[in-house]
Image (tube, grey):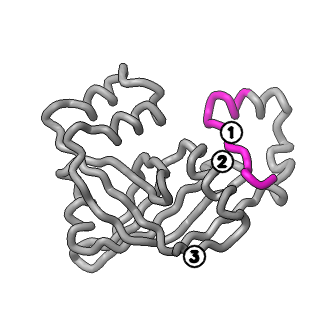
Amino acid sequence: MVDVGGEWNQAQLERFLAEAVVPVRIGCHHPDGGLWMLSLWYQFRDGTIRCATSESAAITSFLRKNPAVSFEISTNHPPYMGVRGNGEATLNPDADKTLLKALIERYLAGKDTPLARRLLSPEREEVVITIQPERLYTWDFTPRMQGSQSNQSPETAAEGAQTSHQQIQSPKF
């Protein structure tokens, strides 16, 4: 059973993880004893966080040595909100690139881009990183950040929101 704390209930947490199109930031152990952090695209499914990466990526060898991870999925623009936690990661081959294709649709809205074509190249071997959360904590600064962009006109703020990022709504407020 996953230990969940913070601002949101389980349904709100799951809604945020399913709808937010931001990367997951994963922290893991480097073989030299230090820490390593990276960002990956993710999919939330059946209570797990799933990422795709190249078999040759450094994180795959790090996780094979020590599967313990921490992670954060949060907004990059006000109002700040998100989920952080820890858990254990497992790796599995994705020969058909099934997860990668789903992530490309989610993050790039199609496979007809140079990045998508490079990621889907036949030479690239993919793995799925599945994070089984053990502890989750949510936060949502929406109420305290109301009007935080008041130095902008409504038109400027709206234009900036449309061009610079997807506006993510709080699942609670």
Classed neighbour count for the residue bearing mark 3: other residues with Cα under 10 Å, few (<14), some (14–19), many (≥20): few
Residue in the foreground of this view, choosing between 104 and 156: 104
Which amino acid type corresponds to the residue marked 2 in the rendered image? Answer: His
**Residue positioned 75% across, 59% down in the render:** 141
Residue stretch in magenta: 159-173
Q: Secondary structure at mark 1?
A: loop
Q: Residue furthest bottom?
A: 33
Magenta stretch: residue 101 in it? no
Is residue 164 found left or right of 119 in the rendered image? Answer: right
Position of residue 125 relative to residue 70, above or below, is above
Q: Residue at x 44, y 48 (%)?
A: 42
Residue 167 magenta-highlighted? yes
What residue lies at 31% left-to-right and 38% top-to-bottom?
98
> Residue 9, position in %: x, y?
70, 64
User: Which residue matches tag 2?
Assistant: 77
State the separation of the CA atoms marked 3 and 1.
Answer: 28 Å
Q: Are marks 2 and 1 in contact (CB under 8 Å)?
A: yes
Determine which of the numbered discs, if any, sits on residue 21 in the image: none
Please name which of the two marks, 2 or 3, marks the residue nearer to the observer.
3
The residue tagged 3 is 3
Residue 167's label in the rendered image is 1
Q: Quick one: label 2 or label 1, which is nearer the N terminus? A: 2
Looking at the rendered image, the disc whose residue lies closer to the viewer, 3 or 1, is 3
